Image (cartoon, grey):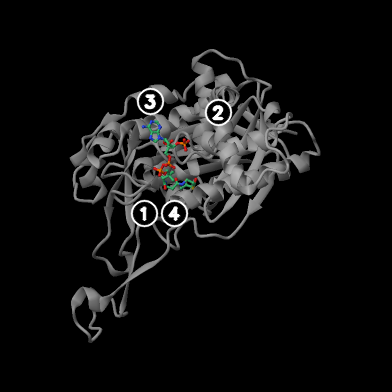
Amino acid sequence: MKTGIDAISFDVANIHLPIKTLAAARNIEPEKLEKGLGLLKMTFPDVHQDAVVFGANALTKLIQDNNLNLNEISRIYVGTESGIDSSKPIASYLISLMEQKFGEDSLAECDVVDFTFACIGGVDALQNCLDFVKLNPAKKAIVVTSDFAKYDLNSGGEYTQGAGAAAMLVTANPRIIAFDDNWATSTKGVFDFFKPYRTISKEEITQNTNNDSWFDNLEAEIEIHKDQPVFDGQYSNQCYMDRTRNAYFSFKKLKNTTETLYNTWHSIVMHLPYSFQGRRMLSEIYALDSAEKIIADDIAPADYQTKIKEVAKSDDYKSFVTEKLQPAELASSLIGNLYTGSIFMGLLSTLAHFYDTNKEVAGEKFGFLAYGSGSKSKVFEGTIQPEWKSALANVKLFENLAESVEIDFNTYESLHKKEQKTSVRTPKQEWVLDRIEKEIPVLIGARYYKWVE
Ligand SMILES: CC(=O)CC(=O)SCCNC(=O)CCNC(=O)[C@H](O)C(C)(C)COP(=O)(O)OP(=O)(O)OC[C@H]1O[C@@H](n2cnc3c(N)ncnc32)[C@H](O)[C@@H]1OP(=O)(O)O
């Protein structure tokens, strides 16, 4: 029996800053961002949007476009690293929003939970749901990924920001892609990118040494939550490369094959924190798994990186990228990082590209290289199913992305600093964050959402 993705939907912020505008404001050569990293637009959440809103919009579309009966959904597993609460998962919010729209108790028997492992939590949720469906072929599961990739102003991550969600229906005999049973993992506990609890001493804020209560905080340390990560960009690239390479060769071992694995894949879908990350990171694997020897066994360690750079610039590698990776990059250039959703947006981008250009890919094998900082990679593969086109007919990825509203630099900065209080775009047929409770003691911080017609 096959298991995989039967239907897919997405939601992104729908407002964006052109990358040229950011480059000009930050005094960065636009060619570096456009031609070096593949960035064109950077989506950013509007005042009424957060990770719950994106996830709920993607899930609502999945339900409506596919006429899903909610009683049939056994689990909704969420991959996210943008949790808005350390206890209550985004999945809990999604349940209440869906019941608000589709009927009280319609998901009362549905199992829900969030998976957090940086950008790979959505893949973990998918793998778990696939196993569940293998054991329970009559049951259906949904994986939602939702994130806001926010970085500090002026930081090296600023131009890779993005926001949005994907939702996928996981079933037996799926219409879009069926995954094979081999999954390889590579893990190492590192600090390449993380979102720690941070503190500021109360004394520094109040200039008072008595530890007097400050807005009901009795502790001498005030805890701060920031959406922005602590990260070391070049080190995170190295971790990405090391983990994906190790998982790739473990996968090859699992498959017990000596042939060049990537040649067996029609398309390659990788975690894309920005559009060209995959092509910049894959050249090492390309060289190491090539049928013809590209890197000599006795190469000096000092020459190794130079050789990999040389491979990355070769015509053979460039045509390999155009053929196998570029379709996945197209949406990323227009959105930015979606963290847990990036790899699934890469799949959607690839399929939407083939759909729009009338290419038949049924029966073709796609390879997946997932990465999450902290760090973990998973490599797996799947086969596109005969009904993929009809299952994607409603998605209209690139048409939707073309409708995104451009914002100017001042608006971007005031959204980033949370100074902007009214939405840039008037919401229509979507979820909005309505209010956050500030008065009732037993509900402080509770977030309330509503559907806007
Ligand atoms: C965060 C996650 O989602 C998880 C992960 O994947 S971790 C791995 C990725 N890490 C991140 O995304 C963390 C946040 N981002 C960052 O730290 C940084 O944006 C980054 C590390 C991704 C990039 O760093 P950077 O210093 O801005 O860019 P840099 O690494 O120098 O690369 C610039 C590229 O543009 C090219 N370039 C520069 N100027 C150019 C020009 N004028 N014309 C054309 N190309 C140009 C450079 O040659 C280089 O490309 P190659 O190395 O492929 O030749």
The label nearer to you, 2 versus 3, is: 2
User: According to the image, label 2 marks what residue?
Assistant: 325
Regarding mark 1 in the picture, which secondary structure is present there? loop
Q: CA distance from mark 3 to mark 1?
A: 27 Å
Pair 4/1: label in front: 4
Amino acid on which the number 4 mark rests in the picture: Asp
Camera-side mark, 3 or 1 = 1
Q: CA distance from mark 4 to mark 2?
A: 25 Å
**Local SS, label 4:** loop
Some atom of ligand 1 lies within 8 Å of the CB belonging to the residue at label 3: no
Residue beneath the point at 79% across and 35% down: 258
Instruction: Kindly identify the amino acid type of the residue bearing the numbered disc 3.
Output: Asn
The crowd level at tag 4 (other Cα within 10 Å; few <14, some 14-19, many 20+) is some
Look at mark 4 in the image and give the residue it sits on. Answer: 232
User: What residue is shown with label 1?
Assistant: 228
The quadrant of the picture showing ligand 1 is top left
Apparent side of residue 304 relative to residue 182 in the rendered image (left or right): left
Q: Nearer the viewer, mark 2 or mark 1?
A: 2
Q: Residue 208 placed where, x, y %?
A: 19, 82
| Amino acid at circle 1 | Gln
Q: Quadrant of the N terminus?
A: top right
User: Horizontal placement of 181 versus 222: left or right?
Assistant: right
Are the residues tagged 2 and 3 within 8 Å (C-beta)? no
**Residue 150, percent across and down?**
36, 48
Q: Secondary structure at mark 3?
A: helix
Residue at coordinates 49% horizontally, 16% vertically from top-left? 356
Where residue 400 is drawn, which disc sits there? Answer: 3
306 left or right of 411 in image = right
